[in-house]
């Protein structure tokens, strides 16, 4: 009986210490933040790489991605574009800020109907 009582008190002590340690641990800050711009566009900010933002958009029907990419690359400060369906990853030059570039990017993405394939 003494052994059982000792084992139970030992387990209870470890459980309490384990719970206290778990409470002390900090939860890591998320590496990204997603912001809803409107019902069709979201933007993802990356904590560890300020030069990249990802834009997710919803559109009905096909898009001429090449024309859309060309319009985005033509923006002063845009260094590169990576794309996936319904996603544009915009990379800016280090000498530019998002305050200069993002309004133009959002203006283009808010008018996606301009980038429909001809005849559709």
Image: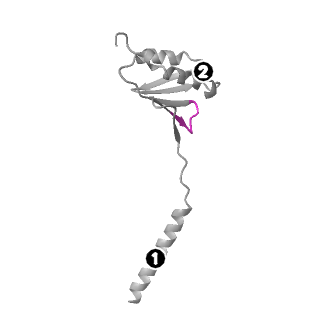
- 106 or 15: which is nearer to us? 106
Please give the count of numbered marks on the rendered protein. 2
Q: Quadrant of residue 93?
A: top right
Identify the residue shown where x is 54% and y is 35%: 45
- The quadrant of the rendering that contains the C terminus is top left
Coordinates of residue 49 in the picture (x, y in percent): 56, 35
Q: Earlier in the sequence, mark 1 or mark 2?
A: 1
- 70 or 119: which is nearer to us? 119
Is 48 colored magenta in this rendering? yes
Q: Colour mode?
A: one colour
Give the residue at the far bottom of this rendering.
Answer: 1
Q: Which mark is residue 12?
A: 1
Is 1 colored magenta in this rendering? no
- The quadrant of the rendering that contains the N terminus is bottom left
Q: Is residue 1 above or below residue 7?
A: below
Q: Quadrant of residue 46?
A: top right
- The span picked out in magenta is 43-51
Quick one: SS at disc 2?
A: loop
């Amino acid at each position: 009986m003494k052994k059982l009582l000792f084992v139970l008190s030992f387990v209870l002590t470890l459980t309490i210490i384990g719970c206290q340690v778990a409470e002390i641990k900090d939860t890591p800050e998320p590496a990204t933040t997603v912001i809803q711009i409107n019902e069709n566009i979201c933007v993802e900010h990356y904590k560890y790489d300020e030069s990249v933002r990802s834009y997710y958009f919803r559109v009905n029907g096909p898009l001429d991605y090449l024309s859309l990419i060309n319009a985005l690359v033509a923006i002063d400060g845009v260094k590169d574009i990576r794309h996936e369906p319904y996603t544009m990853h915009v990379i800016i030059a280090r000498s530019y800020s998002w305050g200069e570039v993002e309004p133009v990017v959002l203006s283009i993405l808010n008018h996606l109907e301009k980038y429909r394939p001809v005849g559709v």
